[in-house]
Image (cartoon, grey):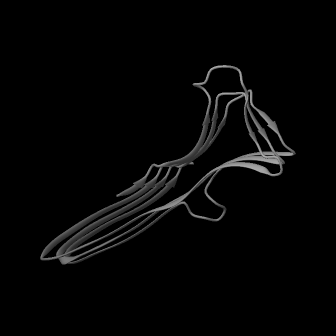
Amino acid sequence: KSSNDSTVGVTLDSTGTTGTEDKSLTSQKGDIVISADKNNTVKTRAVGGSVGIVSAVGINAQASDSGSAAVQVRGNRYTFSGEAVGFSAVNRPEAVVWAGSASVGMDAFQATVGTATVDAKAIMDIDGDNTFKANDVAFAAQVGEDGKTVADTTVIGVGLGGVYSGAVNKAAAATDT
Protein backbone atom coordinates (compact mmCIF):
# COMPACT_ATOMS: atom_id res chain seq x y z
CA LYS A 1 0.00 0.00 0.00
CA SER A 2 1.25 3.45 -0.84
CA SER A 3 -0.43 6.74 -0.06
CA ASN A 4 0.06 10.49 -0.05
CA ASP A 5 -1.86 12.96 2.10
CA SER A 6 0.53 15.91 1.99
CA THR A 7 -0.49 19.54 1.60
CA VAL A 8 1.27 22.20 -0.43
CA GLY A 9 0.14 25.67 0.45
CA VAL A 10 0.63 29.38 0.89
CA THR A 11 -1.04 31.10 3.83
CA LEU A 12 -1.05 34.79 4.67
CA ASP A 13 -2.34 35.07 8.22
CA SER A 14 -2.99 38.27 10.16
CA THR A 15 -5.59 36.87 12.53
CA GLY A 16 -3.24 37.12 15.51
CA THR A 17 -2.25 40.76 14.95
CA THR A 18 -3.69 43.76 16.71
CA GLY A 19 -4.37 47.25 15.44
CA THR A 20 -5.99 48.53 12.30
CA GLU A 21 -2.97 48.96 10.02
CA ASP A 22 -3.16 47.79 6.42
CA LYS A 23 -0.87 45.05 5.20
CA SER A 24 0.32 45.80 1.65
CA LEU A 25 1.84 43.61 -1.04
CA THR A 26 2.81 45.87 -3.94
CA SER A 27 4.50 45.40 -7.30
CA GLN A 28 5.25 48.79 -8.90
CA LYS A 29 5.83 47.50 -12.45
CA GLY A 30 4.70 43.91 -12.51
CA ASP A 31 2.42 41.20 -11.28
CA ILE A 32 1.74 39.61 -7.94
CA VAL A 33 1.27 35.86 -8.23
CA ILE A 34 0.57 33.70 -5.20
CA SER A 35 0.50 30.03 -6.17
CA ALA A 36 0.44 26.57 -4.59
CA ASP A 37 1.19 23.89 -7.20
CA LYS A 38 1.27 20.18 -6.31
CA ASN A 39 2.13 17.47 -8.85
CA ASN A 40 2.79 13.90 -7.74
CA THR A 41 2.25 10.24 -8.59
CA VAL A 42 1.65 7.44 -6.07
CA LYS A 43 2.41 3.97 -7.50
CA THR A 44 1.97 0.47 -6.11
CA ARG A 45 3.14 -2.69 -7.88
CA ALA A 46 2.49 -6.13 -6.36
CA VAL A 47 3.23 -9.59 -7.79
CA GLY A 48 2.67 -13.00 -6.22
CA GLY A 49 2.68 -16.65 -7.20
CA SER A 50 2.39 -20.17 -5.88
CA VAL A 51 3.08 -23.69 -7.19
CA GLY A 52 2.20 -26.96 -5.46
CA ILE A 53 -0.20 -29.87 -5.37
CA VAL A 54 -2.59 -27.53 -3.60
CA SER A 55 -1.62 -23.90 -4.14
CA ALA A 56 -3.16 -20.56 -3.36
CA VAL A 57 -2.08 -16.94 -3.59
CA GLY A 58 -3.71 -13.63 -2.69
CA ILE A 59 -2.61 -10.09 -3.58
CA ASN A 60 -4.13 -6.80 -2.43
CA ALA A 61 -2.46 -3.67 -3.84
CA GLN A 62 -3.58 -0.12 -3.02
CA ALA A 63 -2.50 3.40 -3.98
CA SER A 64 -4.20 6.59 -2.79
CA ASP A 65 -3.76 10.35 -2.90
CA SER A 66 -5.80 12.56 -0.59
CA GLY A 67 -3.46 15.55 -0.58
CA SER A 68 -4.30 19.17 -1.23
CA ALA A 69 -2.99 22.40 -2.72
CA ALA A 70 -4.19 25.49 -0.86
CA VAL A 71 -3.94 29.28 -1.01
CA GLN A 72 -5.39 31.00 2.04
CA VAL A 73 -5.58 34.62 3.13
CA ARG A 74 -6.62 34.69 6.78
CA GLY A 75 -7.63 37.95 8.33
CA ASN A 76 -8.34 41.23 6.60
CA ARG A 77 -7.02 44.63 5.59
CA TYR A 78 -4.54 43.23 3.07
CA THR A 79 -3.98 45.34 -0.06
CA PHE A 80 -2.66 43.62 -3.20
CA SER A 81 -1.46 46.15 -5.84
CA GLY A 82 0.11 45.51 -9.24
CA GLU A 83 -0.54 45.31 -12.98
CA ALA A 84 -2.17 41.92 -12.36
CA VAL A 85 -2.89 40.00 -9.17
CA GLY A 86 -3.34 36.24 -9.34
CA PHE A 87 -4.01 33.48 -6.85
CA SER A 88 -3.93 29.81 -7.88
CA ALA A 89 -4.14 26.43 -6.15
CA VAL A 90 -3.44 23.55 -8.55
CA ASN A 91 -3.29 19.88 -7.54
CA ARG A 92 -2.31 17.23 -10.12
CA PRO A 93 -2.57 13.89 -8.30
CA GLU A 94 -2.22 10.44 -9.82
CA ALA A 95 -2.66 7.02 -8.17
CA VAL A 96 -1.53 3.97 -10.17
CA VAL A 97 -1.83 0.28 -9.21
CA TRP A 98 -0.52 -2.78 -11.04
CA ALA A 99 -1.19 -6.15 -9.40
CA GLY A 100 -0.66 -9.66 -10.73
CA SER A 101 -0.70 -13.22 -9.40
CA ALA A 102 -0.62 -16.81 -10.64
CA SER A 103 -1.30 -20.13 -8.96
CA VAL A 104 -0.53 -23.56 -10.49
CA GLY A 105 -1.25 -27.00 -9.03
CA MET A 106 -3.66 -29.93 -8.97
CA ASP A 107 -5.89 -27.61 -6.98
CA ALA A 108 -5.04 -23.97 -7.64
CA PHE A 109 -6.71 -20.80 -6.36
CA GLN A 110 -5.78 -17.14 -6.68
CA ALA A 111 -7.24 -13.77 -5.84
CA THR A 112 -5.90 -10.39 -6.96
CA VAL A 113 -7.32 -7.04 -5.91
CA GLY A 114 -6.08 -3.61 -7.00
CA THR A 115 -7.52 -0.29 -5.83
CA ALA A 116 -6.46 3.22 -6.86
CA THR A 117 -8.19 6.13 -5.13
CA VAL A 118 -7.83 9.88 -5.57
CA ASP A 119 -9.63 12.15 -3.10
CA ALA A 120 -7.56 15.28 -3.66
CA LYS A 121 -8.50 18.92 -3.12
CA ALA A 122 -7.58 22.38 -4.40
CA ILE A 123 -8.50 25.07 -1.88
CA MET A 124 -8.86 28.81 -2.45
CA ASP A 125 -9.92 30.58 0.75
CA ILE A 126 -9.70 34.38 0.86
CA ASP A 127 -11.25 36.18 3.83
CA GLY A 128 -13.29 39.34 3.24
CA ASP A 129 -12.37 43.01 3.72
CA ASN A 130 -9.25 42.83 1.54
CA THR A 131 -8.41 45.19 -1.35
CA PHE A 132 -7.24 44.27 -4.85
CA LYS A 133 -5.83 47.12 -7.00
CA ALA A 134 -4.98 45.79 -10.47
CA ASN A 135 -6.11 45.77 -14.09
CA ASP A 136 -6.58 42.00 -13.84
CA VAL A 137 -7.43 39.97 -10.73
CA ALA A 138 -7.74 36.18 -11.02
CA PHE A 139 -8.55 33.33 -8.63
CA ALA A 140 -8.20 29.69 -9.74
CA ALA A 141 -8.49 26.32 -7.99
CA GLN A 142 -8.05 23.16 -10.04
CA VAL A 143 -7.65 19.40 -9.48
CA GLY A 144 -6.22 17.31 -12.32
CA GLU A 145 -5.39 18.21 -15.89
CA ASP A 146 -7.43 17.87 -19.08
CA GLY A 147 -7.00 14.41 -20.58
CA LYS A 148 -4.95 13.00 -17.70
CA THR A 149 -6.11 9.96 -15.76
CA VAL A 150 -5.86 10.52 -12.03
CA ALA A 151 -6.69 6.96 -10.87
CA ASP A 152 -5.65 3.85 -12.84
CA THR A 153 -5.67 0.16 -11.90
CA THR A 154 -4.46 -2.91 -13.81
CA VAL A 155 -5.07 -6.41 -12.39
CA ILE A 156 -3.93 -9.71 -13.93
CA GLY A 157 -4.56 -13.10 -12.32
CA VAL A 158 -4.35 -16.75 -13.43
CA GLY A 159 -5.32 -19.94 -11.63
CA LEU A 160 -4.39 -23.22 -13.39
CA GLY A 161 -5.53 -26.43 -11.70
CA GLY A 162 -5.47 -30.04 -12.86
CA VAL A 163 -8.58 -30.93 -10.85
CA TYR A 164 -9.90 -27.71 -9.33
CA SER A 165 -9.07 -24.10 -10.00
CA GLY A 166 -10.49 -20.76 -8.97
CA ALA A 167 -9.64 -17.17 -9.76
CA VAL A 168 -10.99 -13.89 -8.47
CA ASN A 169 -9.74 -10.59 -9.88
CA LYS A 170 -11.01 -7.15 -8.98
CA ALA A 171 -9.82 -3.78 -10.20
CA ALA A 172 -11.20 -0.50 -8.86
CA ALA A 173 -10.30 3.09 -9.61
CA ALA A 174 -12.15 6.00 -8.01
CA THR A 175 -11.87 9.75 -7.91
CA ASP A 176 -13.68 12.15 -5.60
CA THR A 177 -12.26 15.61 -6.16
* Above/below status of 139 relative to 163: above
* Above/below status of 39 relative to 126: below
* Above/below status of 171 relative to 165: above
* The quarter of the displayed image where residue 54 is located: bottom left
* Above/below status of 20 relative to 72: above
- Going by the picture, which residue comes out furthest to the top? 19
134 vs 56, nearest the viewer: 134
Q: Position of residue 46 (x, y in %)?
A: 33, 68
Q: Position of residue 82 (x, y in %)?
A: 81, 45
Q: Position of residue 72 (x, y in %)?
A: 62, 38
143 vs 47, nearest the viewer: 143
Residue occupying the point 60% across, 64% down = 148
Query: Left or right: 150 with respect to 23?
Result: left
Query: Left or right: 169 with respect to 144?
Result: left
Q: Pick the quarter of the image with the N terminus.
A: bottom left
Residue occupying the point 54% across, 60% down = 150
Residue occupying the point 65% across, 28% down = 75
Q: Position of residue 97 (x, y in %)?
A: 42, 65
- Going by the picture, which residue comes out furthest to the right? 135
What is the total number of numbered labels drawn onto the structure image?
Answer: 0
- Going by the picture, which residue comes out furthest to the bottom? 162
